[in-house]
Image (cartoon, grey):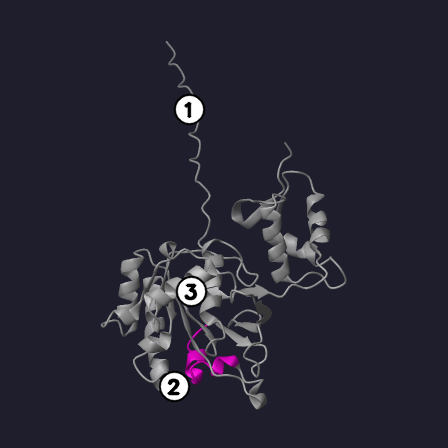
């Protein structure tokens, strides 16, 4: 009697491993790397806090910031020089519901006078804290804010902790005004009168009046100065509510840009890089990247583009 040959066993199919998206190494692509300290500076009453609130609102809702892709994360905002009431009124003026915005005023806490205490307070407000905004960061530096050694020691102590805490810090403070014979002075050397603030941080964003001799001039210049990316100089005007509105070039080239995209087949996907390349062919000199991002945002709002996965966009299917 011959033995039966065993039936061949079919190999088990390999388990399907879901594709995981790598965590971004920036909170704003290219200009604000994670686990670093960054600064926002400008003279008094230049609009630093207003610009900061407007920028945070764009960032936390996933809109571009200065033409760069945003990666929102849990955050807290600490005001070191004004009351909670002032913060709430400024948020309301900017169009943000204070109840949706995690913040605290440290002047209402007698024991919050250093970075560790500030971090502990922020962590109570937002337990999953990843980004900490400190408006008036010089108030917790533990020494004179224009003393290079005191500032350098403070920033070194903060920076040593950030990777372990998985925390990014963005400080806000005053920088000195530009005088006529100092117009080309590096903005990194003007924050709180000490160059150590600039050397101990990664990206600096500086907002200034376009004309320092005219207090009522609504024009503002914003300089974005990263360590490892090209600098940007952006022009804004303050509207009737004191909000920053980007100066838009005329004539608009939105329609021409949109037509070059919507001529594709419904359902086609396109990357942001491809959209930037398309924009480079519009007109004689192309469309600036910051303007392209506004145009993309407008096309999404109008339903001409839909956000797809992995930072891609898709043309909507026809009904």
Picture disc at residue 90: 3
Residue lying furthest top: 1
**Occupied quadrant, residue 250:** bottom right
Residue lying furthest left: 111
Which region is colored magenta?
187-202
User: How many residues crowd around disc 1 within 10 Å: few (fewer than 14), some, or many (20 or more)?
Assistant: few
Q: Residue at x 55, y 63 (%)?
A: 66
Q: Earlier in the sequence, mark 2 or mark 3?
A: 3
User: At which x and y percent is residue 296?
Assistant: 61, 52
Quickly name the residue at label 2.
148
Is 182 within the magenta?
no
Front residue of 233 and 219: 219
| Any part of residue 80 in sight | yes
SS at mark 3 in the image: helix
User: At which x and y percent is residue 94?
Assistant: 47, 61
User: How many residues crowd around disc 2 within 10 Å: few (fewer than 14), some, or many (20 or more)?
Assistant: some
Q: Nearer the viewer, mark 2 or mark 3?
A: 3
- For marks 2 and 3, give the CA distance: 32 Å
Picture disc at residue 9: 1
Q: Earlier in the sequence, mark 1 or mark 2?
A: 1
User: How many residues crowd around disc 3 within 10 Å: few (fewer than 14), some, or many (20 or more)?
Assistant: some
**Occupied quadrant, residue 126:** bottom left
């Amino acid at each position: 009697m011959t033995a039966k040959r065993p039936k061949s066993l079919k190999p088990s199919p390999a388990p399907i491993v879901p594709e995981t998206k790598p965590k971004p190494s920036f909170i704003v692509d290219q200009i604000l790397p994670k686990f670093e300290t960054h600064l926002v500076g400008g003279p008094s009453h230049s609009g630093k806090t207003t610009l900061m609130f407007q920028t945070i609102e764009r960032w936390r809702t996933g809109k571009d910031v200065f033409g760069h892709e945003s990666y929102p994360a849990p955050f807290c905002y600490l005001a070191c020089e004004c009351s909670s009431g002032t913060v709430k009124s400024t948020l309301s003026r900017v169009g943000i519901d204070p109840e949706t915005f995690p913040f605290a005023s440290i002047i209402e806490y007698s024991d919050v006078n250093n970075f560790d205490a500030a971090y502990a307070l922020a962590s109570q407000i937002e337990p999953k804290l990843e980004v900490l905004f400190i408006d008036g960061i010089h108030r917790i530096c533990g020494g004179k804010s224009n003393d290079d050694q005191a500032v350098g020691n403070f920033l070194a102590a903060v920076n040593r902790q950030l990777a372990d805490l998985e925390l990014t810090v963005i400080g806000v403070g005053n920088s000195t005004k530009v005088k006529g014979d100092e117009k080309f002075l590096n903005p990194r050397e003007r924050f709180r009168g000490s160059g150590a603030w600039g050397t101990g941080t990664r990206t600096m964003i500086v907002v200034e009046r376009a004309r320092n001799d005219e207090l009522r001039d609504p024009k503002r210049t914003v300089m974005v100065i990263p360590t490892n990316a090209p600098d940007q100089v952006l022009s804004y005007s303050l509207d009737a509510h004191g909000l920053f509105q980007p100066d838009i070039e005329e004539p608009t080239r939105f329609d021409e840009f949109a037509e070059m995209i919507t001529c594709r087949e419904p359902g086609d996907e396109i990357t942001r890089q491809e959209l930037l390349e398309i924009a480079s062919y519009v007109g004689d000199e192309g469309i600036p990247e910051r303007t392209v991002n506004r145009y993309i945002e407008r096309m999404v709002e109008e339903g001409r583009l839909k956000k797809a996965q992995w930072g891609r966009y898709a043309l909507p299917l026809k009904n």
